Amino acid sequence: MILGDKHKSNADYLDSCRKKRNETEYDLAGNISEDEVEELINFCHELRKEVLRWLQNVKHEFLIR
């Protein structure tokens, strides 16, 4: 992962969310709680901040100004 090994657990978390979304979409409607949705939203906000910080420090040419 481009952000480093410390984010491996983030990739694992997002993969488990993806799997649960697929199950919910195709097999078990209503399988995701509001708390899980809120947790994922908060996680994504924090990950976005981290990615933007990384872009500013390492790959600033990729930032849209």
Image: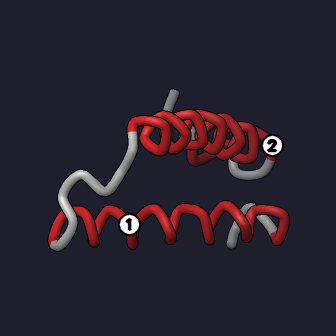
Q: Answer above or below: position of 53 versus 23.
A: above
The residue lying toward the viewer, choosing from 37 and 6, is: 37
User: Residue at 74% across / 46% down in the picture?
Assistant: 54
Render colour scheme: secondary structure
At numbered mark 2, what does the secondary structure look like: helix, strand or loop?
helix
Check residue 29 in the rendering and tell me which mark sits there, or answer none: none
Classify mark 1: residues with Cα within 10 Å, few (<14), some (14-19) or many (20+): some
Question: As shown in the figure, which amino acid type bears the numbered disc 2?
Answer: Asn
Which quadrant of the view contains residue 6? bottom right
User: Residue at 38% across / 66% down in the picture?
Assistant: 20
Q: Answer above or below: position of 34 versus 22.
A: above
The residue lying toward the viewer, choosing from 32 and 12, is: 32
Q: Is residue 20 left or right of residue 36?
A: left
Q: Answer above or below: position of 59 versus 24.
A: above
At numbered mark 1, what does the secondary structure look like: helix, strand or loop?
helix
Q: Earlier in the sequence, mark 2 or mark 1?
A: 1
Residue 16 image position (x, y, % from top left):
50, 69
Q: Is residue 63 left or right of residue 2?
A: left
Question: As shown in the figure, which amino acid type bears the numbered disc 1?
Answer: Lys
Residue 18 image position (x, y, % from top left):
40, 66
Q: Is residue 19 left or right of residue 52?
A: left
Residue 11 image position (x, y, % from top left):
62, 67
**Residue bearing mark 2:** 57
Check residue 20 in the rendering and tell me which mark sits there, or answer none: 1
How many numbered markers are drawn?
2
- Label 2, label 1: how far apart the Cα atoms are: 34 Å
Q: Nearer the viewer, mark 2 or mark 1?
A: 1
Name of the residue lying farthest toward the top: 65
